[in-house]
Image: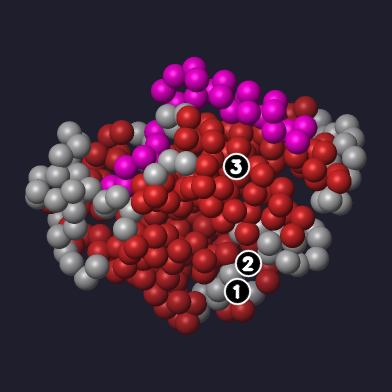
Amino acid sequence: MQTLVIALLLAGVLGFFAPQAQRGLRLLLESRPASIWAFPFLFTAIFAGAAALAGAFSVKLTLLVLAYTLAPVFCTAGGRLLPPLVSPAGKNNRGRKPTTGGTRDFLAILLLWLPLELAAGASLVPRPAQGFLHSVAYGIAILLALVLFLGYRPLPGMKYNLPRSARDLWLPLAAFALLAPVLAVLGIAVGFIPPPHLSSKPAGAMAGALGVIFAGTALPEEILFRSLIQNIIMLRFGVSGRTLLAAAFIFGCAHLDNGPQPLPNWRYMILATVAGIAYGKVFERASSVTSSAILHTLVDWTKHLFF
């Protein structure tokens, strides 16, 4: 049952790649803007059900999750029930401009990300259930972000669509050929990874790992750090080397609390920042966030299997 819950959340995230799903969401929130407030309660109910399934349900934990899901909605809505919305034709039918990434939009993104990054509420969850419920919370956070920034306040440049040309597929492969040697040499030099070795896993497991890394790590992180954070910085300050570096640095800092080295893990931060520059550049040049997610997948897959 736990696997089914994760699969359903993943299906929701992937389902928004369909243009029809995005249009339907926008039309719903355009015709009934107050319905945005139903999503925190829906996602909290999903989490509460998952917690009960894992034997970790509590009223305090449920209220904490409700506050977590309400906060970015309140921040994005600004206390109003009539947000600026964009029609499928790209025109605002209320005479307002689409969001260009204001302060409250960035704050909403931080409210979605930082509680998960800091493991808020982990003390309320029994240790055996923490991994499962963290995955559930992560899935809910990504879904809520998509509801807010694909439907409620459409954010230009998210590139949340499937690849549109062969360029979207060969670009991450070319970037990987350039990036992998740099990360390998730098990672060994700073003591983050050992020298490379052949993988002991069978071919089927290695192939399966690509899908798991893409769906469980690369795509969610690229939605957060490229479609949202890097994109919103570029909307505010323009596309430049500085904005690319700023977004990559934020991505690097997000890895300071990751092992296996002692925390804060400055080695991981350096490698992630360098990788973030490449991910961000691919995101800039491609027409789909899946391009940077493919590159991200290849880097993580190589690290886990060959180092």
Q: Secondary structure at mark 1?
A: helix
Question: Which percent across, then down, holds residue 269?
Answer: 69, 55
**Neighbourhood count class around disc 1 (C-alpha, 10 Å): few under 14, some 14–19, many 20 upward:** some
Q: CA distance from mark 3 to mark 2?
A: 31 Å
Q: Return the disc, 3 or 2, that comes first in the chain's sequence.
A: 2
Q: CA distance from mark 3 to mark 1?
A: 31 Å
Question: Which percent across, then down, holds residue 13?
Answer: 43, 45
Q: Which labelled disc corresponds to residue 130?
A: 2
Give, as a three-letter code, the residue at label 3: Ile
Residue under the image location 31 percent in, 33 percent down = 19
Which one is in front in this view, the residue at disc 3 or the one at disc 1? 3
Q: Which labelled disc corresponds to residue 277?
A: 3
Along the horizontal axis of the image, is 42 left or right of 167? left
Which one is in front in this view, the residue at disc 2 or the one at disc 1? 1
Q: Secondary structure at mark 3?
A: helix
**Neighbourhood count class around disc 3 (C-alpha, 10 Å): few under 14, some 14–19, many 20 upward:** many
Along the horizontal axis of the image, is 91 left or right of 203? left
In the image, the segment drawn in magenta is: 154-182
- Of the pair 1 and 297, the residue shown nearer to us: 297
